[in-house]
Amino acid sequence: MFKKVLIANRGEIAVRVMRACRELGVGTTAVYSEADRRAFFALYADEAHFLGPAPARESYLNVEKIIAIAKLAGVDAIHPGYGFLSENAEFARACEAEGIAFIGPTSGIISAMGSKIRAREIMAGAGVPVVPGTGAISDPVKAAAAAREIGYPVLIKASAGGGGIGMRVVEDTHELLQAIEQSQSTAQSAFGEPTVYIEKYVRHPRHIEFQVFGDQYGNIIHLFERECSIQRRHQKVIEESPSPVMTPQMREEMADAAIRAARAVNYVNSGTVEFIYSEGKFYFLEMNTRLQVEHTVTEVITGVDLVKLQIRVAAGEPLGMRQDEIRQTGWAMECRVCAEDPLANFTPTPGVIRGYRSPGGIGVRVDSGVHMGYPIPPYYDSMISKLVVYGQDRREVIERTRRALFEYVILGVTTNLPFLKAVVENGDFQSGEYSTHFIEEHPDLLADVARIHGERSLGGIFAALRNNQSIAAITGAISAYLRDDQKQKV
Ligand code: ADP
Ligand code: ADP
Ligand code: MG
């Protein structure tokens, strides 16, 4: 086993990885930017090294600096978390070259799956159904012919894409050329690579993905599906497992395709095969070669600690479990708590957290990177905390999630908490009948948010804080706020 692991990330995921290390008796090294001097993850680590200025380019994306710190600190391995360098083949290669274990797949696998075009070719070759589409677009005349053949609407996508960036829906030929040019320019600036391709735009799909895991001895397993259709701007907000639409037969077919996908690239470590699902049919979307934000729901229903498994497998241990030993028990749901304003098109709302209390009780797990007094920096992703709820069935999980969201207190910054409440209280969400368009098709959710904002007496808490009143006065104001919230529910 490793002696010391460097975590090349920040926030809740850095804490998540360090917790796994602590349980394994492995030492931890944090790296932090100027904006994260007082962040919890930097304090939690056994040792922390300053990385550089706040902008990610100069800190969390600085490969040379991170490798230099890893050598200086004498770590055996680096965990990249998600986002940042987690799917950067150059970074994985740099680790390999320095004899530092990269806790993830090999650079070869990352680079093959990092190109969506190449991934689609490999998967089609392995007999995995892919969304009808093209290879790289170069000639506009050929592109128009291909789009006509696929049939409108089509989606222009960046081959190097991620985070929902650079996608454009095109309804007919007139819009095609301009959309291609726009996507190319977005792709160039976001990913440093302008290549785009065309996919059939599936009208009312669901996003269903499978967690896969491989070790260095050719064993590959899956840990069932995650339903991730509740999205804003093509980014996930609420995820659950199992999927409300899954049947045992469909699960078997999709799991089989996911395993075939992983085998096609001799997959090692944690990975996710994403599918788009519509009317009983499913197609390969992409493979994420890293730990996923929503890995938590899989952990909760299978009882497998995916991060510990990642570390063990990277250290050369075998998976140590057979497919038939992995069971899906109960139901799990994750809400991404973000510092963002749902009423202002979900724009991020950085600022200082003046009051913080996370929920607890049976079936509740909170993975968080923040605390009272913490200034949420404007430089990184707006997600600050994940609420993961477990229950016997979906109904219990929804009731428990409502209860846990009610207990959440985050003061001083606007968050999406009221929005999350509105979603879990929505009838269509509760029925399980939803697609990736759920949020845009339910403007009533925003009306609910406005109502929740309006009815609450937050004023008292802010007044107590502004006037530097005693802790008792502030706590009193918070209790009053909670009581109001309760009244509104009854
Ligand atoms: P997941 O499938 O795990 O939900 P996401 O696509 O939401 O993955 O990305 C995970 C994290 O990485 C998020 O914090 C997201 O903002 C960030 N991220 C992923 N890809 C990019 C990218 N290309 N540019 C910027 N941020 C990204
Ligand atoms: P990213 O790398 O940005 O995560 P994905 O290919 O995984 O890109 O797509 C992100 C989301 O965009 C999907 O979850 C889905 O909501 C939507 N999407 C992607 N491709 C299609 C498609 N062909 N038809 C309809 N929606 C799509
Ligand atoms: Mg994706």
Image: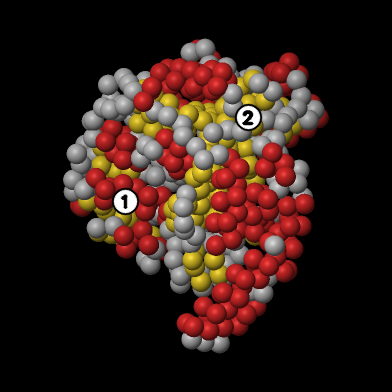
Against 56, is 453 above or below? below
* Residue 409, quarter of picture: bottom right
Q: Residues within 10 Å of mark 2 (few under 14, many from 20)?
A: some
Query: Which residue is disc 2 drawn over?
Result: 245
Q: Position of residue 453 (x, y in %)?
A: 69, 66
Tag 1 secondary structure: helix
Q: Residue at x 49, y 55 (%)?
A: 385
Q: Position of residue 307 (x, y in %)?
A: 35, 41
Against 242, is 198 above or below? above
Quarter that holds the C terminus: bottom right
Say left or right for 489 vs 135: right
Against 90, is 470 above or below? below
Would residue 120 be seen by someone viewing this image from the given angle? Answer: no
Query: Which residue is disc 1 drawn over?
Result: 18
Report the amino acid beneath label 1: Met
Tag 2 secondary structure: loop
